[in-house]
């Protein structure tokens, strides 16, 4: 069922008028978040976060949001051992991937500074790219969320449920 749902996500930004693409919110979803549908759905929190991820992906598909993908995504997805999950994630990344201008030297320096502050290498790289390319960094990793909230970052960091709750009209 996960495979069917992930295959139905299509990015249609190129069909939208410039008015819509200009005011779209830009999101950076880390690999932990994108892989949430492959986690044990018998746990309530994981199921709720999975539903939130699917809702976000649907809104990307309809052009309400824009997702950005970095080289870190491809590196992490390349390390996935289960073939079906790897294939689904590769396909999803290709559909979400849009060319973005990014200063790789600045990104590397910023990632190195984040590593010095105690972030892991992959997390630091994700955050460095996200701060250059997006308005929101979305992750399901509790330890990373806590560390990000303690650090001074130039991007809003939250889990998928927090993001959806923030976006929903009251």
Image: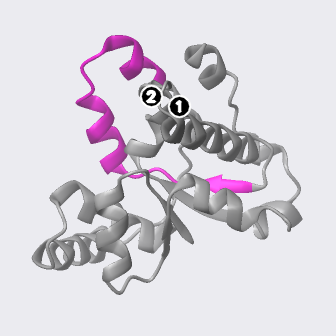
Q: CA distance from mark 2 to mark 1?
A: 5 Å
Q: Main secondary structure of the magenta part?
A: helix
Answer left or right for 70 relative to 67. left
Identify the residue at horizontal 40%, vertical 52% (top origin).
70
In this view, 68 is above or below 133: above
* Magenta stretch encompasses residue 23: no
Image coords of residue 145 (percent x, y): 37, 65
Nearer to us in this view, 104 or 143: 143
* Extent of the magenta region: 65-90
Identify the residue at horizontal 25%, vertical 77% (top origin).
110
Mark 1 element type: helix
Mark 2 element type: helix
Q: Given contact means CB atoms under 8 Å apart, are the residues at marks 2 and 1 in contact?
A: yes
Image coords of residue 20 (percent x, y): 85, 62
- Name the residue that disc number 1 marks: 92
Nearer to us in this view, 57 or 107: 57
Q: Quadrant of the N terminus?
A: top right
- Name the residue that disc number 2 marks: 89
Nearer to us in this view, 117 or 63: 117
Q: Quadrant of the C terminus?
A: bottom right
Identify the residue at horizontal 28%, vertical 39% (top origin).
76
């Amino acid at each position: 069922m996960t495979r069917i749902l992930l295959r139905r996500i299509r990015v249609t930004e190129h069909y939208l008028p410039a008015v819509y693409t200009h005011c779209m919110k830009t999101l950076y979803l880390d690999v932990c978040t994108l892989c949430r549908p492959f986690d044990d759905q018998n746990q309530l929190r994981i199921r709720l976060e999975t539903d939130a991820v699917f809702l976000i992906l649907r809104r990307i598909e309809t052009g309400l949001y824009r997702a950005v993908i970095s080289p870190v995504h491809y590196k992490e997805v390349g390390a996935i051992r289960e073939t079906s999950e790897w294939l689904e994630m590769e396909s999803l990344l290709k559909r979400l991937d849009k060319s973005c201008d990014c200063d790789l030297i600045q990104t590397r320096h910023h990632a190195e500074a984040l590593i010095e502050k105690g972030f892991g290498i992959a997390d630091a790289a994700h955050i460095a790219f996200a701060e250059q390319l997006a308005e929101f960094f979305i992750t399901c990793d509790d330890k990373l969320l806590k560390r990000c909230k303690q650090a001074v970052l130039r991007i809003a960091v939250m889990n998928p449920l927090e993001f959806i709750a923030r976006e929903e009209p009251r």
